[in-house]
Image (spheres, rainbow, N blue to C red):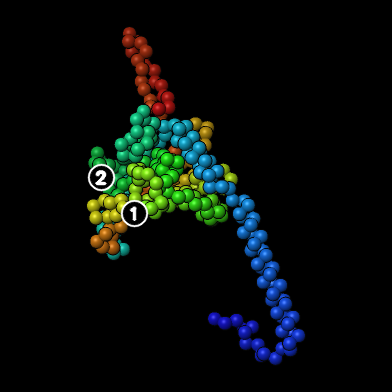
Amino acid sequence: MWSGRFHEPLTRTFGQWQRSALRGAFGCSWVFGWLLFTINARAQQSPPIDVVLAHLRSSIAASVTALPSFTCTEQILSQETRNNHVTEETRLATDLRVTRSATSDPQTGTRLKEIRVLRTVEGKPPAGQNPSLPLTVYGVFGDGFDRFLDSKFAPCLSAELGIEERLYGHPTMAVHFLPKPDDNVTGKPCPPVAPGASATLWLDPQSYNLVAAETNIPHAKVLHYQGLRVSYRYAPVMLNNQQFILPQSVDATMTDLRSSGTLRYQATYTECHLYSVSTTIQTSPNTGSQQSTSSPH
């Protein structure tokens, strides 16, 4: 679509064209100068990637280390679709209990153990069944980003900083972890880093707290499905009068290699609070009196 200014008759004098050209040149110079100023200002405001990674590693490690046992209300939707039609779907409501263990969990690789206590299946009492889901994601509250943040895996990954990337309507600072080409990898491959795996972590530019994250493992397989992409959204949660940055939601997808099928897992986490264990202690065998106590687990 053309602007009307291009349809003016060409009847200007040489002086008019000269003045017009000068105005255009000064206008372009002003715009160019403004762009240079903006680029330089952003470059000066951009922290070094090593500083950002150091803040990120320390904040996540401190959060995971200090995180007490807690429980959240979890809403799960797991489904399989083919040709844009839902072929299988399960909805669960659970009490998700996250407790600290002395040893690493074999499923998640972290010391935070996740236990689900079913409340409803398809809106009804579970009646003791353990439903099978098309797709399940474990270790949402663990330290699963270690494979990207641990410095010993640096030979396998490159980290790039993106400034002022807007997310959920707010400015963020993004760290993109990308696999290095095979000829740039020194030494042995990093076992915890799957081939081709990548991740992006979005941070608050002031506090360095996590805002969102996305991991992509292209070679992950479940039957004939491949390529696991998981997105997380984070929010501050108060536990024991201390603020922690915890997942608010998770969204995972896998694609069918044979047809236009997709596995999807969505979960939200609300009403998180300290997890306590109640015990009943008999204090007087003669009288049968009892005392009930409750303490954080």
Residue 141 vs 159, above or below: the answer is above
Where residue 43 appears, as percent x and y from the top left, is: 61, 54
Where residue 24 appears, as percent x and y from the top left, is: 69, 76
Q: Amino acid at mark 2?
A: Pro
Where residue 202 appears, as percent x and y from the top left, is: 49, 50
Q: Residues within 10 Å of mark 1 (few under 14, many from 20)?
A: some
Report the label total: 2
Which tag, 1 or 2, sits closer to the chain's start? 2
Of tags 1 and 2, the one toward the viewer is 1
Point 29% across, 42% down: residue: 125
- In the rendered view, does 149 fall on the left or right side of 163? left
Picture quadrant where residue 281 is located: top left
Q: Amino acid at mark 1?
A: Pro
Does residue 214 appear in the picture of this structure?
no
Give the residue pinned by disc 2.
131
Indicate the secondary structure of the residue bearing disc 2: loop
Give the residue pinned by disc 1.
218
Point 49% across, 52% down: residue: 160
Point 24% across, 39% down: residue: 128
Quarter of the figure with the N terminus: bottom right
The residue sitting at the top extreme is: 286
User: How far apart, in angstroms, are the residues tagged by discs 1 and 2?
Assistant: 27 Å
Does residue 276 appear in the picture of this structure?
yes
Quarter of the figure with the C terminus: top left
Residue 104 vs 280, above or below: the answer is below
The residue sitting at the right extreme is: 15
Where residue 269 appears, as percent x and y from the top left, is: 42, 44
Indicate the secondary structure of the residue bearing disc 1: strand
> In front here: 275 or 33?
33
- In the rendered view, does 129 fall on the left or right side of 166? left
